[in-house]
Image (tube, grey):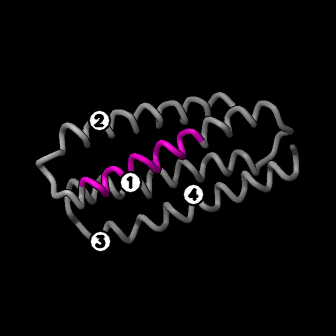
């Protein structure tokens, strides 16, 4: 429980910090399309930081299940792969990094499916 709350809070903090950096540090330094790419990374990071926080709370309230912990780790992997690849793409303009982004998206989708299954099974 504690680990997911910490991971979720750290990622929420980072999303706010990276959002501010994008708005103030990158504006005028990168093309508008890359600034939008950065914003997409920040948005998805924040959504999934909240998802990880929710998982942290549910782990403490529901019976022990691998469904929830796997969901939490998949959300973290999704943040790293999806948002991380978008951040690096924005800063380096190495377009091949765009091939990594969908892997993060699949991790996000799998995480939400596991959370749905856990909710159906235990709530």
Where does the image place residue 26, in percent across and percent down from the top left? 18, 45
Q: Tell me the crowding category of disc 1: few under 14, some 14 to 19, or many 20 or more residues within 10 angstroms, Cα based.
A: some
Q: Indicate the position of residue 42 as horizontal and vertical percent values.
A: 39, 46
Image disc number at residue 96: 3
- Determine the secondary structure under disc 4: helix
- Classify mark 3: helix, strand or loop: helix
What is the C-alpha distance between the residues marked 3 and 4? 21 Å
Which residue is labeled 1 in the image? 40
Residue 40 x, y percent position in the rendering: 38, 54
Decide: is 44 above or below 63. below
Label 3 or label 2, whichever lies nearer to me, is 2
C-beta proximity under 8 Å, tags 4 and 2 = no
What residue range appears in magenta? 35-50
Q: Earlier in the sequence, mark 4 or mark 2?
A: 2
The reply to whether dot 1 and dot 2 touch (C-beta < 8 Å) is no
How far from the left and from the top, in percent, is residue 105?
51, 62
Of tags 1 and 3, the one toward the viewer is 1
Closer to the camera: disc 1 or disc 4? 1
Viewer-side residue, 8 vs 77 = 8
Count the labels in the image: 4
Q: Which mark is residue 108?
A: 4
Whether the magenta-drawn stretch holds residue 29 is answered as no
| C-alpha span from label 1 to label 2 | 13 Å
The answer to which of marks 1 and 3 sits earlier in the sequence is 1
Label 3 or label 2, whichever comes before in sequence order? 2
Residue highlighted by disc 2: 20
């Amino acid at each position: 429980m504690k680990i997911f709350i910490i991971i979720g809070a750290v990622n929420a903090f980072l999303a706010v910090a990276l959002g501010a950096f994008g708005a103030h540090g990158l504006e005028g330094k990168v093309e508008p399309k890359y600034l939008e790419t950065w914003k997409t990374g920040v948005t998805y990071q924040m959504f999934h930081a909240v998802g990880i926080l929710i998982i942290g709370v549910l782990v403490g309230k529901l019976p022990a299940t691998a469904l929830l912990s796997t969901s939490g780790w998949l959300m973290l992997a999704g943040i790293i792969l999806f948002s991380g690849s978008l951040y690096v793409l924005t800063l380096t303009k190495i377009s091949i990094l765009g091939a990594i982004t969908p892997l993060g998206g699949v991790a996000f989708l799998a995480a939400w499916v596991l959370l749905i299954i856990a909710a159906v099974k235990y709530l």
